[in-house]
């Protein structure tokens, strides 16, 4: 995939302001094609209806959490290799282990800067 | 309340506001508070359970939170609206997460609930443990805010 600044990124977070914050950070590092979903259920609908290259998802959300969304993505043959960056305020070891077991591509703990976000995205894309 | 709880919340607050809103607040001297009247115009409150139980509130003055959220979103916000309340919830979540990580390194594994946000002059902040709570006051160029913590280690 390379460091493709044209890739379409889906931000999943129940807080509209956090989606806006992440969108702003992505713009700062050159990613303009960004769509949003308010929880895992809406995110799955978006993933099924259009081609999305990268998912940035919050962990704690109503209806369908980030870890449930990740498991659903990995279990879907068409989406299973999708890069998935988990964003969370939780950094407890057991959560990291759970996310890794579920197949997360990388993990970022709030608060974070545009530089840190850029590094995480680059690392994931390099591994693809 | 155990004074070991003060520094994790103080450091987490500075870290979150510096990283997300590019604001470096100056902490004042912590003091005890016995009533439930909030010190700011909008507050985010979150409960904790686990090795320690209690709650934390962040109470912001209007000028202070307008600047913080304007910086976070990259747009000029002039009144306390839905975006502000949403952001206060998220800031509360982030401060709680960062503070709990620091508490984990002291051997205290704590879970948090979902934050609630209350706005309006003279609103109240009720802590799960009743009180008194410890107030950590902060100053910013646009006005003050406080971190109001009432947490105790489970014996």
Image (cartoon, rainbow, N blue to C red):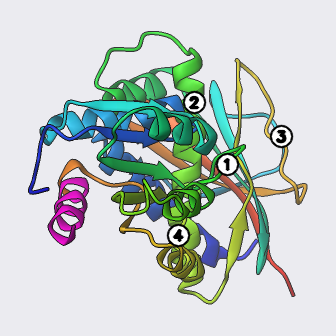
Q: Does the magenta stretch include residue A94?
A: no
Pointer 4 residue? B8
- Dot 3 or dot 4, earlier in sequence: 4
Label 4 crowd bin: few (<14), some (14–19), many (20+), radius 10 Å? some
Q: Position of residue A111 (x, y in %)?
A: 39, 54
Q: Specify the segment rendered in magenta.
A: A116-128
Are both tags, 3 and 2, on one chain?
yes
Q: Which residue is at the front of the view, A32 or A49?
A: A49
**Position in image of residue A100 (x %, y %):** 47, 77
Q: Mark 2 points at which residue?
A: B86
Query: Both on one chain, marks 1 and 3?
Result: no
Disc nearest the viewer among 3 and 4: 4
* Quadrant position of the C terminus of chain B in the picture: bottom right
Q: Residue furthest front?
A: A77
Q: How far apart are marks 1 and 4 (CA)?
A: 31 Å
Answer with the quarter of the image where residue A121 lies: bottom left
Q: Distance between the residues labelled 1 and 3?
A: 35 Å
Secondary structure mostly seen in magenta is helix
Q: Which of marks 4 and 2 is nearer the N terminus?
A: 4
Q: At x 67% / y 48%, what residue is drawn? A: A64
Q: Badge 1, how many Cα within 10 Å: few under 14, some, many 20+?
A: some
What secondary structure is marked by label 2?
Answer: helix
Return the residue at label 1: A64
Q: In which quarter of the image is residue B126?
A: top right
First in sequence: mark 3 vs mark 2:
3
Marks 4 and 2 close (CB-CB < 8 Å): no
- Chain label for disc 1: A
Q: Are marks 1 and 4 in contact (CB under 8 Å)?
A: no
């Amino acid at each position: 995939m390379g460091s493709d600044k044209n890739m379409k990124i889906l931000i999943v977070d129940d807080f509209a302001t956090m989606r806006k914050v992440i969108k702003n950070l992505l713009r700062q590092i050159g990613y303009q094609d960004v769509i949003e979903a308010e929880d895992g259920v809406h995110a799955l609908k978006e993933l099924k209806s259009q081609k999305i290259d990268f998912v940035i998802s919050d962990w704690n959300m109503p209806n369908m959490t980030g870890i449930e969304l990740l498991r659903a993505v990995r279990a879907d043959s068409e989406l299973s290799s999708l890069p998935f960056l988990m964003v969370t305020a939780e950094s407890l070891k057991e959560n990291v282990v759970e996310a890794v077991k579920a197949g997360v591509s990388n993990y970022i703990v709030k608060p974070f800067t545009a530089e840190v976000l850029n590094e995480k995205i680059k690392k994931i894309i390099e591994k693809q | 309340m155990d004074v070991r709880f003060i520094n994790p919340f103080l450091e987490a607050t500075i870290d979150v506001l510096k990283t997300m809103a590019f604001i470096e607040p100056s902490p004042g001297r912590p003091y005890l508070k016995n009533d439930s009247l909030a010190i700011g115009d909008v507050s985010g409150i979150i409960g904790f359970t686990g090795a320690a139980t209690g709650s934390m509130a962040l109470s912001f003055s209007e000028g202070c939170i307008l600047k913080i959220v304007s910086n976070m979103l990259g747009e000029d916000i002039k009144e306390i609206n839905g975006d502000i309340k949403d952001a206060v919830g998220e800031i509360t979540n982030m401060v709680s997460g960062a503070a709990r990580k620091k508490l984990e390194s002291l051997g205290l594994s704590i879970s948090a609930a979902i934050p609630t946000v209350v706005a309006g002059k003279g609103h109240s902040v009720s802590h799960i443990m009743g009180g008194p709570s410890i107030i950590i006051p902060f100053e910013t160029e646009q006005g003050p805010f406080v971190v109001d913590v009432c947490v105790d280690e489970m014996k």
